[in-house]
Structures are given as C-alpha cells and as structure tokens.
Amino acid sequence: MYTKNQTVSYFFIKGISELPYLQVPVFLLVLLLYLSTLGGNMTILVLVCRERQLHTPMYFFLGNLSILDISSTTVTLHKTLTTFVTGVKMVSFAECMAHAYFFMALECTELLILAAMSYDRYVAICNPLHYHMVMSYRICVLLATMCWMLGFVEVIPNTCILSNFTCYTSNIINHFFCDILPLMKISCSDVSLLKLWIATEGVIVSGLIPLSMTVIPYIFIILVILKIRTLNGRRKAFYTCSSHLTIVVLLYVTLYCIYLLPTSENSLDYHKLFSLFNTAAVPLLNPLIYSLKNKEVKSATKKLLNLFCDKLKQCVSFTEQITRIDGGGS
C-alpha cells in the first residue's frame, strides 16, 4: 500500500476516463486514431521515398514530420491501448521518466522541424532563382539533424530535475501518459526550480525561439506576396505555404492550451482532452492537410493506389490460375 510523502518506484496511469461504460468506446476511438495516424503518416513516408516528384526539400522535411508524428503518438497512446488489453495500469518510475523525456523531446523537435520548413518556404518564394542551391540535399540533412539533436538535448535538464524529485503525495497520475504537469501536481518536493526552468528554457528556448523562427520568414513571405501584381500569382504563392501554415497554427494553439493556460485540479480533465487532441488528432491531420491541399501528393497517391490495385489484380489472377490447375489435376 502506498504511503504519502514517500519516494515511489511505480505509478498508476489513470487513463482518459475511469467510467466503466466508456472504456470500450474510448479504446476503439484511440485505436482508430492510432491506426489512422500510422496509416496516414506511413503513406506520406512511402510517397516521399518512392516518388521522384516528391524528392524536394519541402517533402524531405514532411517525411521527418511524419516520423515525429508516428513516434509521439506511439509514446503517448500505447499505454492506453495496452492497459485495455492487459488491464495493467502500473508503470515503473524509470519507464515513466522515459515517457516524459521522449514526449518532450519529440514535441521540441517537431517545433524545430516546422521552423526549418518555414525557412524552406521563405527561400522558395523570396529567393526562387537560388532555391536549389540554398536548399541543397546536404543543407536539408544538416538542418534536420540539428533539429533532432537540439530537440533531444534541450529537454535533458527537465527530465533530470523531474527524476530527482524525492517524494509524491500520490502515485496515481491523472493522465493517460507520464506528462510533466501531472507529475508536478502530485509531487511534494520543491518544484520551484522546475517551474523556473520551464518558464525560462521551456517557454523561451523551446517555444518562443522556434515560433519566431517560424513567424519571421512568413512576414517576409507576405511582403513578397503583396508585391505580386496578379491575383492568380498571389493565390499560387500563398497556396504553397497554406498547408504548412495550417499545421503551425494548429500545433501552437494546442500546445498553448495544454501548457500555458492556468491549471487546477478541475482543469486536469481539460488538460487530458487537449493532450489527446495534440497526440492523436494533430498527427492524423498533418498528412490529411498535405494530401488534400497539395497536387503533387494527390498525384503520387493516385499513382500508388493504381499500382496497388494492379498488384492486387495480378495476385487474384494468379490465385485463380493456380485454383484451375489444381482443379483440372484432380
């Protein structure tokens, strides 16, 4: 039995809902979202790797975004799915810290990748003649590598401070994964250092700097678009940025609702809802937004579907031939 104000070696994850009659609907909803996210982002990855017309910097970064979405969704939702199947809500202290670290690292990396995509759109519209020279494959790989490294390094202090908390008022986490805010809520250790670190490094370095790196290029992009004389030219220039801009707004608004709105015991349920939207719905919307708004992705998707249908027809035809041969032989 757990005693208050003592060090814990394991936690219990409360989950999305504790109501018995909601367990099956919630499981089915999470499973559907998870499989749809995997399917959508895996499709984007296959298209980006397979189709020559998508071998451009924008789709290279979109492939990185798909990997991040698959990873973050798996980190956060796998406990909800396994809990329903196994009935085990317990998670070890080390595993909980790992969940918190990887989730924060993947979120920070995604913000940096979006900033890199913003720079790519800036070069494409404001400096189109030198686009292929500025955004060469080497530069793209270097930018993506820096984003991944910075994202995974900058959250190490958060995790170290969190893992050094010595006592908790409860070992029940009112969430569906180990997030930093619910863990701080149940800690009886001095969390002032972690709060200070989140307010400085978390908000400024992990939040405001990537946001400014994303917004500033769009200021120059808008100025260039306004100078275009024809309405069709303006529309075409804005169209190339609309998918990325939609994802940026969606992600930053969701993160603001999760981490910057005042939290209380009553608001933790809203925190879980926003977190569910961030970890399940947003990664699902990313490939949908790009596939619905980009002609290149639509064309590549149709080509892939036609190829899949042709292969399926060949398999069916081959199976029928084998069946006829076996039937004639008997």
Image (tube, helix red, strand yellow):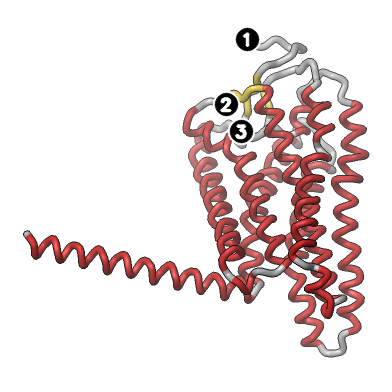
Crowd tier of the residue under label 2, counting other residues whose Cα lies within 10 Å: few below 14, some 14–19, many 20 or above: some
Task: Name the residue beneath numbered marker 1.
Answer: 1
Residue at the spot x=89%, y=80% of the render?
226
Which mark is first along the chain, 2 or 3? 3
What is the spatial separation of the Cα atoms under label 2 and label 1, in whole angstroms? 15 Å
- Residue type of the residue flagged with mark 1: Met
- The reply to whether residue 216 is visible in this rendering is yes
- The x, y position of residue 29, in whole percent, is 54, 46
Residue extending furthest toward the left:
330
- Residue type of the residue flagged with mark 2: Lys
Circle on res. 15? 3
Q: Which element type, helix, strand or loop, lies under badge 2?
A: loop
Residue extending furthest toward the bottom:
230
In this rendering, position of residue 253 left or right of residue 39? right
Residue at the spot x=84%, y=70% of the render?
122
Disc 3 and disc 2 in contact, CB within 8 angstroms: yes
Along the viewing direction, whichever of 87 and 329 lies nearer the viewer: 329
